[in-house]
Image (cartoon, rainbow, N blue to C red):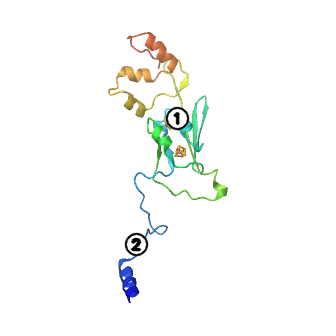
Amino acid sequence: MGFLKILLANLRKGPATEAFPFGPAATPDRYRGRVSLDASRCTGCRLCEHVCPGGAIRIDEDAAGLDITIWHNTCVFCGLCAHYCLSHAIACTTDWHLAHAQADKFALAERTRVAKVPCARCGKPWLPASDAVMALAFRQRTAETEALRRLCPDCRAKASIEGGRHVRTHH
Ligand code: SF4
Ligand code: SF4
């Protein structure tokens, strides 16, 4: 009799578990799921590659930029890359739909290109500070900070030696 009561009550209440895979599953906002990279925020510092315990991040540099590969199959979702990335270019998303066949493990990767830009003075390609880093570094961005940002480290050093004079750039 007690059993029948419970059965009827449960039938009235409906399922108490997640509807997934037939419906969405609740995911906490701070869930550490698939790692993703926003190239516009990245400055190519390689810290994420350095701290990744799984070796899931690989950065290949060539004359024109960086190729950043995140191997989802190798990631252990520790969140260290997102924690240490100063500009919040790399982040853990709440996407956990990463189930895949063993044969597809090398295809499960995010590949991002971060392009170098020519130095405004000497033309040498390099990676300038992203907007995200500039916003962190300077409370107020002036014409001078913007001009310095467009110089490669060598030309910036020369500009510093030139002192308080206007930062010269060639367009
Ligand atoms: S994603 Fe972040 S930590 Fe990784 S290279 Fe870019 S700026 Fe550096
Ligand atoms: S979450 Fe951890 S294991 Fe995954 S890419 Fe980032 S640092 Fe590497």
In the image, farthest residue toward the front:
2
The residue where tag 1 is placed is 47
Judge whether 50 appears above or below 142 on screen.
below
Q: Nearer the viewer, residue 122 or 153?
A: 153
Residue at (49, 32) in percent of width and height: 43
Circle 2 packing at 10 Å, graded few (<14), some (14-19), many (20+), is few
Q: Residue furthest right?
A: 103
Task: In the rendered view, tell whether residue 109 sits above or below residue 60.
Answer: below
Q: Which residue extends farthest bottom? A: 1
Q: Badge 1: how crowded within 10 Å, few (<14), some, or many (20+)? A: some
Q: Position of residue 44 (x, y in %)?
A: 52, 33
Q: Is residue 148 above or below residue 111?
A: above
The one nearer the camera, 112 or 20, is 20
Q: Give percent across and percent down for residue 51.
A: 54, 38
* Closer to the camera in the image, 3 or 40: 3
- Residue at mark 2: C-beta within 8 A of ligand 2: no
The residue depicted at 45 percent of the width and 36 percent of the height is 41
Mark 2 is on which residue type?
Ala
Q: Are marks 2 and 1 in contact (CB under 8 Å)?
A: no
Looking at the image, is mark 2 or mark 1 earlier in the sequence? 2
Query: Disc 2 marks which residue?
Result: 16
The residue positioned 36% from the left and 86% from the top of the image is 5
Residue type of the residue flagged with mark 1: Leu
The quarter of the displayed image where residue 139 is located: top left
Instruction: Give the CA distance from mark 2 to mark 1.
Output: 44 Å
Vertical order, 158 against 118 (above or below) = above
Q: Is mark 1 within 8 Å of ligand 1?
A: yes
Q: Secondary structure under badge 2?
A: loop
Front-lying residue, 95 or 78: 78
Q: Can you give x and y, in whole percent of width and height, for residue 110 in the image?
A: 56, 46
* Relative to 29, 60 lies left or right: right
